Image (cartoon, rainbow, N blue to C red):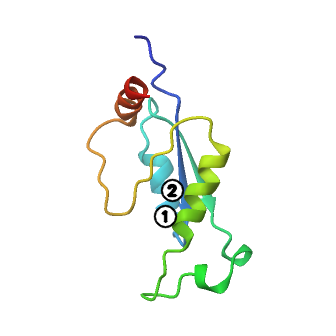
Amino acid sequence: MALNKGCTHLVVYDLGMTPAQQYSLADGLHPLEGSVAVVPFNYSAYPAHVKRHGKANTFAWKPIIIGEVAESSAGFVVWLDIGDVVHSRLWRLREQLEEVY
């Protein structure tokens, strides 16, 4: 099977990253993996309980972000959180998803 390994599009929502963190995301993606977009999350568009309040975070932004990406994506949506570690290339995950779905 010939698979375009560069068609993975990584979307990262900025919930308060520093410029250095944003740069390291773009710089750390292997060219064969595809592209990365850093999207600022617009807290002001949502009720107060969605906003981050230090350690009193409700994480109410998670389903909002997943919904936004699912609505705008024609492909698979995979949620990775801060505690997730990717040990392989993302195109391998996409290959497995395409076999199942």
Task: Tell me if mark 2 has few (under 14), some (14-19) or many (20+) residues whose alpha carbon lies within 10 angstroms of its own.
Answer: few
The secondary element bearing badge 2 is classed as helix
Q: CA distance from mark 1 to mark 2?
A: 5 Å
For the N terminus, the quadrant is top left
Q: Residue at the spot x=47%, y=87% of the render?
A: 54
Three-letter residue code for mark 2: Tyr
Q: As drawn, is 20 to the left or to the right of 43?
A: left
Q: Is 38 or 69 nearer to us in this picture?
A: 69
> Eyeballing the image, is 81 above or below 2?
below
User: Percent position (x, y) of residue 93?
Assistant: 36, 34
Instruction: Determine which residue is flagged by label 2.
Output: 23
- Count of numbered circles in the view: 2
The percent coordinates of residue 14 (x first, y second) are 56, 64
Q: Amino acid at mark 1?
A: Ala
SS of the residue under disc 1: helix
Q: Could you classify mark 1 by the number of other residues whose Cα lies within 10 Å: few (under 14), some (14-19), or many (20 or more)?
A: few
The residue lying toward the viewer, choosing from 29 and 4, is: 4
Residue at left offset 60%, top offset 56%: 67
Residue positioned most to the left: 87
Q: Position of residue 73 (x, y in %)?
A: 62, 41
Q: Residue at x 43, y 11 (%)?
A: 2
Q: Among all residues in the image, which is located at the extreme top?
A: 1
Q: Are marks 1 and 2 in contact (CB under 8 Å)?
A: yes
Q: Residue shown at 44%/52% (left/top)? A: 79
Q: State the residue in front, 100 or 39.
A: 100
Q: Is residue 76 above or below residue 65?
A: above
45, above or below 97, in the image: below
Q: Quadrant of residue 32?
A: top left
Screen quadrant of the C terminus: top left
Q: Which mark is residue 20?
A: 1
Check residue 70 in the rendering and tell me which mark sits there, or answer none. none
Query: Is 86 above or below relative to 95?
Result: below
